[in-house]
Amino acid sequence: MAHSETFVVMTGGRDFVDLTDDVARIVGRASADRGLANVFLHHTSASLILCENADPDVRRDLEAWMARLVEDGDRLFTHRSEGDDDMAAHIRSILTTNSLSVPVAEGKLLLGTWQGIYLWEHRYRPHRRRVTVTVVG
């Protein structure tokens, strides 16, 4: 049995959006006793992460570290079609991921105590992002 749903997330620019509840609702509608939920982001300048959800400092520190690792507007980059954050956003998404798999049991995500599913927007401007959740079980 497989169940799949796509939803749209509006981002506010470079930041994190907690998708945990949205994904959990879709998993619940799938009625899978046990299986696997795949979360897929249809974009190349944002990413998905499984991150600590209790302390927002974790995400702020992650952003600060990534900004140092991949500098916006680096003179090395030739791809700047949409601004200084363009190529940096693509690199950030490649270094992270656009797909996550989470086990499912009794119709619920088997996340750890402090884990959450986040969309990490890598662009400065707000964007409309599509996410597909597929539950197989």
Image: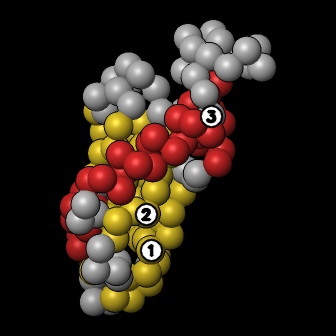
Q: Percent position (x, y) of residue 14?
A: 39, 31
Could you tell me how far apart the alpha carbons at marks 3 and 2 are, in whole angstroms?
Answer: 20 Å
Mark 3 secondary-structure assignment: loop
Name which residue lies at 25% across and 60% down.
55
Q: Is residue 27 visible?
A: no
Nearer-N-terminus badge (2/1): 2
Q: Percent position (x, y) of residue 111?
A: 34, 78
What amino acid does circle 3 point to?
Val
Nearer-N-terminus badge (3/1): 3
Could you tell me how far apart the alpha carbons at marks 3 and 1 are, in whole angstroms?
Answer: 28 Å
Reading the image, the residue beneath label 2 is 50
Reading the image, the residue beneath label 3 is 70
Q: Nearer the viewer, mark 3 or mark 2?
A: 3
Mark 1 secondary-structure assignment: strand
Relative horizontal placement of residue 92, taking residue 114 as reference (left or right): right
Contact between marks 3 and 1 (CB within 8 A): the answer is: no
Nearer-N-terminus badge (3/2): 2
Where 37 falls versus 103 (above or below)?
above
Residue 133: image tag: none
What amino acid does circle 2 point to?
Leu
Residue 102: image tag: 1
Q: Quadrant of residue 133?
A: bottom left
Q: Quadrant of residue 107?
A: bottom left
What amino acid does circle 1 point to?
Val
Q: Quadrant of residue 109?
A: bottom left
- Which class describes the residues within 10 Å of circle 3: few (<14), some (14-19), or many (20+)? some
Q: Is residue 80 visible?
A: yes
Could you tell me how far apart the alpha carbons at marks 2 and 1 are, in whole angstroms?
Answer: 9 Å
- Which class describes the residues within 10 Å of circle 2: few (<14), some (14-19), or many (20+)? some
Task: Identify the coloring.
Answer: secondary structure
Contact between marks 2 and 1 (CB within 8 A): the answer is: yes
Contact between marks 3 and 2 (CB within 8 A): the answer is: no
